[in-house]
Amino acid sequence: MVTPDFFKQRPNRERALGGFWGGLVRFAPLLIVMGVIVYGSLYPFVFHDAGSLTDAIASLAGTWDHPPQSRGDMLANLLFYVPLGFAVTQAFGRAGAKSSAAIMAFALGAAFSLCLELLQFYESGRFSALSDVYLNSAGTALGAALACMAGERRLNLSWPLEGAAVFARILLLAWLAWRLFPYVPTVDLHKYWYSLQPLFHDPGNALGEICRDTILWLSVICLARIGFSPKNLAGFLLPAILCFFAAKIVIIGQYVGLPDVAGAVLALALYLSVRRWFDAAIVPMAFLFLALVVHTRIMPLQWAPEPKPFQWIPFFSFLHGSLQFNIIAFWQKFYLYGALLLLLVKAGMRLSVAVAVEGAVLLAASVAQIFLLGRSAEITDALMALILGLVYWGLRRWLPAPAPA
């Protein structure tokens, strides 16, 4: 059980990890987040001589009253910097000093965004705007606030703080980010009715979709069991699922389908019937989820007229496709690959073996996509598995499981 002195003991845990490894575990998430932001902001790194630094500053200042280009652009710039604010606050925050770290995070996020916007003045195909700096700074502040909330004792006493539990909660947030995009509610009563119509009139390929959604919902329940105290989980699941579908009804562009509802009901019923044997049920759940991930990567099997080249540039499709589609695809892959990794570890695999197995499966599926129509054969998926493995490893080192009493 986590005690109120947990955060007071953190410096001792750092010393136990050793100076180099302690520093690596502490700052690795921050460095990874900053690297991803730089990559996403400046790719494909084609620079040209557009003028002096004074010209770049004047061009940027001239956009002070320009609004974001679209709602998707606004959400992307806001959410892109949330991990930065969280990572800075966690890296520099100490017991009783989270507020100072949050202020530092906001200043660093604003400065970092400003520097990247000035660099975009010299990058072909990029447009720098102060609205991006405003939104990036707001996203950093939001991430810092979340990190401060995560450090509150009243929350930590009720949520397990070991690495697997924290990783599970991060994945559940990714699930919501995937399933509830674009997160914008409406008060249009006609929209509410349209959201429910597919539940009665559009079953589609009901059996296959119900099986898929049942496995997805089982994974969500497994992560909730890992990420939260299981004492009252059964009483929490039903209202949480109802809130999820209520959100889908009121959010623009979302709807409630029969397979999703049936999958949630079946998954909840299965969990309630095997919860006493939960640890044993993790093993078949892990392999079911592995099959689901493979199915997601290669189905439907539509052969291309000729093989396409394999793309070795990381996140190539994310950087060249539709912004809305890319956001959904990123959070979907983040959840699927992270949940698979966690389930494999909980099923008994060592973390290194689980990362190797998942990376090999995803790489094989990506190679197979060379011959499939409408698929992007690239290194990104295997790389995401490796990155998620490093995140999980860092959390386990930084937040070790408490010793059994």
Image (cartoon, grey):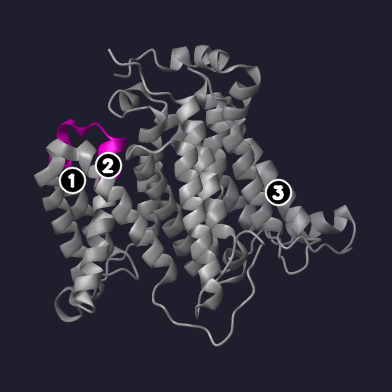
N-term-proximal mark, 2 vs 3? 3
Q: Residue at x 41, y 78 (%)?
A: 301
**Residue 293 sits in quarter:** bottom left
> Real-space Cα distance between discs 2 and 3?
38 Å
Magenta span dominant secondary structure: helix
Left or right, 383 with reference to 236 = right
Give the residue number, with chain letter if any, for mark 3.
114
Tag 1 near tag 2, CB within 8 Å: yes
Tell me the amino acid under the disc marked 3: Leu
Residue 182 visible, this orientation: no
Q: Please name whichever residue, 245 or 223, is drawn nearer the observer in this view of the structure.
A: 223
Left or right, 119 with reference to 305 = right
| Image coordinates for residue 252, horizontal then vertical, percent | 34, 68
Find out whether residue 53 is within the magenta segment: no
| Secondary-structure class at tag 2 | helix
Give the residue number, with chain letter if any, for mark 1.
237
Disc number lying in front (2 or 3): 2
N-term-proximal mark, 1 vs 3? 3
| Secondary-structure class at tag 1 | helix
> Real-space Cα distance between discs 1 and 2?
9 Å
> Real-space Cα distance between discs 1 and 3?
43 Å
Q: Residue at x 61, y 23 (%)?
A: 21
Give the residue number, with chain letter if any, for mark 2.
224
Disc number lying in front (1 or 3): 1
| Image coordinates for residue 76, horizontal then vertical, percent | 53, 58
Residue 118 visible, this orientation: yes
Tell me the amino acid under the disc marked 2: Ala
| Secondary-structure class at tag 3 | helix
Q: Residue at x 32, y 52 (%)?
A: 287
